[in-house]
Amino acid sequence: DGGITQSPKYLFRKEGQNVTLSCEQNLNHDAMYWYRQDPGQGLRLIYYSQIVNDFQKGDIAEGYSVSREKKESFPLTVTSAQKNPTAFYLCASRRQSYNSPLHFGNGTRLTVT
Amino acid sequence: SQQGEEDPQALSIQEGENATMNCSYKTSINNLQWYRQNSGRGLVHLILIRSNEREKHSGRLRVTLDTSKKSSSLLITASRAADTASYFCATDSSGNTGKLIFGQGTTLQVKP
């Protein structure tokens, strides 16, 4: 079955450490996205990538970094510069970067203490 | 920036009743999409309506789009307890920028 895999489901880190969240898709989608969701809130766009080796900042990119070296993979690094990193992180992909729906992974819940 | 603003924030109804959620947005769009999220899970796509469409149906779901008012509504008819979830609208801005921006969502509770 095709889909998006995010790992791990739960992640715990100490303050000051960088952490990388994994996102892999086997849907052959061109575009991939990272969103952050805080309790009871909507999704806020962190970064997105429309093609391999290219990505754009979303609305809350500060303190995050991404890479898109392969079509299937779009890892997100939460750096120590991110002031409030504890959140639910959702990765998504879609066939093309417009006029198509997003397919979501099941998310990674990151807790930083 | 949140493109979509939804109301109500929360909605509680009895099984069998209809549920209506509204979404307003600010800029020109290519399309508007509705998603559903069960607690602690990823979102699932429900319907995509293009800017040149006014109404779309999928099973018990009916979506309308009024580009002059920059608003959309999602109607769930004959609701079931299994419809309990959060519902989000998302807008694909015109110009094919690739940005898909979500609203704050409506939490729907359907009581059996």
Image (cartoon, rainbow, N blue to C red):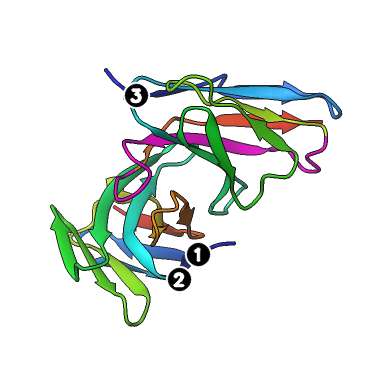
Classify residue B56 as left or right of residue A8. left
The reply to whether dot 1 and dot 3 touch (C-beta < 8 Å) is: no
The reply to whether dot 1 and dot 2 touch (C-beta < 8 Å) is: yes
Query: Residue farthest to the bottom?
Result: B68
Tell me the residue that label 2 is attached to.
B27
Please tell me whether mark 3 sits on a helix, a strand or a loop. loop
The reply to whether the magenta stretch includes residue A83 is yes
Tell me the residue that label 3 is attached to.
A3
Looking at the rendered structure, the kind of residue marked 1 is: Gln
Classify residue A95 as left or right of residue B24. left
Closer to us: mark 1 or mark 2?
2
Q: Is residue B65 above or below residue B50?
A: below
Tell me the residue that label 1 is attached to.
B3
Check chain identity for marks 1 and 3: say if they share one.
no
The N terminus of chain B: image quadrant: bottom right
The answer to whether residue A98 is visible is yes
Q: CA distance from mark 1 to mark 2?
A: 8 Å
Q: 10 Å neighbourhood of mark 3: few (<14), some, or many (≥20)?
A: some
Looking at the rendered structure, the kind of residue marked 2 is: Thr
The image quarter in which residue B108 lies: bottom left
Closer to us: mark 3 or mark 2?
2
Residue B56 drawn at (x, y percent): 16, 62
Q: Is residue A25 above or below residue B58?
A: above
Q: Name the one closer to the observer, A39 or B78.
A: A39
Q: Chain of mark 1?
A: B
Q: Main secondary structure of the magenta part?
A: loop
Q: Chain of mark 2?
A: B
- In magenta, the rendered stretch is A81-101
Which of the marked residues, 1 or 2, is nearer the chain's N terminus?
A: 1
Q: Name the residue: 41% across, 65% down.
A: B11
